[in-house]
Image (spheres, rainbow, N blue to C red):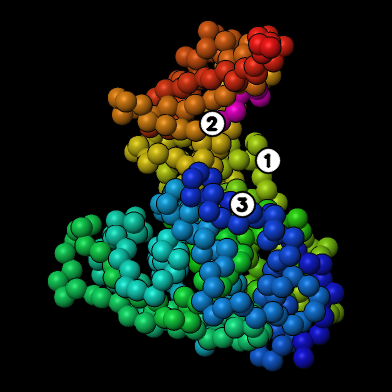
Amino acid sequence: MARKSDKPVLRPSVSMPAGPAADRLVSPATVATRDALMPYRPQDVAGPGIVIDMDGGMDTSVPALAEENALGLTAKVAAATFERDGYKHLIKAAEAVYSYPANGSRLSLPAQKMLNFMIHLAGSQNFANKLYRLPKKVVRGNHKGNERIFDAVKEIYESSLVVIGPFRGRRSRAELRILSSYVRPEEEIESDSADIHFQFTDAFLELQRASKLWARLSGPAMVKVTSTYALKLYEIGMQRYQMDFPSLALDIDTLRRLLNVPEGAYKDFGILRTRTIDRAIAEVNQLAPFRVEMPEAKMVRRGRKVEEVTLDFFAKDEDEVADTFLERERHSVGRRARRTGKVEKLEPAVVEATPLPDADDANALWAAARHALLAKNVPAPLLRDLEVERIEETARGERRLVLVAGHPATAQTARMNHEPSIRSVLVSLTSGSITGVEIVAPPRRKDRAADPAPSA
């Protein structure tokens, strides 16, 4: 029997999709108060791996599902997110985030990214057991030819994942095949019009359907990650950084498995750290909305040997969010040099117009715009009183940022004195993708005292 953990229970701050589709979802407060994700060390259970305790208590028992195919909150969030954002945000069950390839194998970076798109697509239909069709253009940015695309699909088809956690009411160590089938056309035409057809296994779909916790990945950020280690660390961070207690203590063997380090490679911790962990942390800190640190003071040692490390995840402040947004808009050439501080930071490169940004990108854009506007002598109090409402398309097909002022005087001042500057900065930051701004005054409250008295 697994011993009770002496680590604190970790409570997630669950973010919910906005918009009409979110009205169908359960309130996150009812979940965050009872669910938790607790990593256990491999020696706590029979066999190596990670145990995910979805019950959130210190007891090792896990209540059985009400029904075998009951939909968990992850499936509902995935469907609502896809309806609102498409592939801009990807929902992945926490159990899948903390899984790792079986038999000491590993998934390549293109295969890991493609699997995330596949999981999100299945989530759009509540992880139904069916043949799915993924548009090739969704993953074309990372695969310049059809051969690489279908090679990645084949790699996923031939792989299994190890998941240790509650399965049908019992804590289990499950080795799950990912795909039951996929279709590879005989003539692979270099065209985005072709689709990728695939079907998940029943067990893998059930894992997603029953999940209550998830990671909300940014599609634009994920595709820019250049190493398998950084991608896995990014997924873990996106699942944890908004928790009340976002730290994660891991023994070295578990850390190696989670990061997909090849079996037998980098046996010395010093080499493992410099070749994989530190590089992954640096890349994630450059592209993600959070920072990750591995403090020396929290390392557990036996003699000179490091046996356990702690990863701390922190949400970035406004300055860091702005820098992250600008870095993602720059060309990838020189990103590693900028990350290591070997070159000076360059001005944002001109990029092609991007799809309509989602709410998170709009907030990051406005954070970057505020910094640029301060340099143009726009008063800081005025900028602080303007908040992002949305990004919308006008009747002419142009895009504009809608800002809501906290006070009517702020809206009037911004329109009269600073609207051209705001518009100019937005055009510069988005390379012409957003060309307008609308500054909206707050709605006025009705003065009840002025209402006519009811007739007798």
Left or right of residue 156: residue 91: right
Q: Secondary structure at mark 2?
A: strand
Q: Secondary structure at mark 1?
A: loop
Disc 2 marks a residue whose amino acid type is Glu
Left or right of residue 442: residue 293: right
Q: Residue 215: which disc?
A: none
**Residue at the image position 69 percent from the left and 79 percent from the top:** 63
84 and 283: which one is in front?
84
Per the image, is 369 magenta? Answer: no
Which badge, 2 or 1, comes first in the chain's sequence?
1
Q: Residue 15: which disc?
A: 3
Q: In the rendering, at what x and y percent does residue 147 appear? A: 25, 70
Counting every numbered tag in the picture gives 3
Disc 3 marks a residue whose amino acid type is Ser
Residue 336 shows in this picture: no
Q: In the rendering, at what x and y percent does residue 21 appear? A: 48, 50
Which badge, 3 or 2, comes first in the chain's sequence?
3
Disc 1 marks a residue whose amino acid type is Asp
Is 393 placed above or below 411 here? Answer: below
Magenta part of the chain: 382-388
Q: In the rendering, at what x and y percent does residue 354 appear? A: 37, 40
Left or right of residue 66: residue 206: left
Which badge, 1 or 3, comes first in the chain's sequence?
3
**Residue at the image position 44 percent from the left and 40 percent from the top:** 357
The C terminus sits in image quarter: top right
State how far apart marks 3 and 2 are (Cα): 18 Å
**Residue at the image position 71 percent from the left and 73 percent from the top:** 55
146 and 20: which one is in front?
20
Label 2 belongs to which residue? 389
Label 1 belongs to which residue? 317
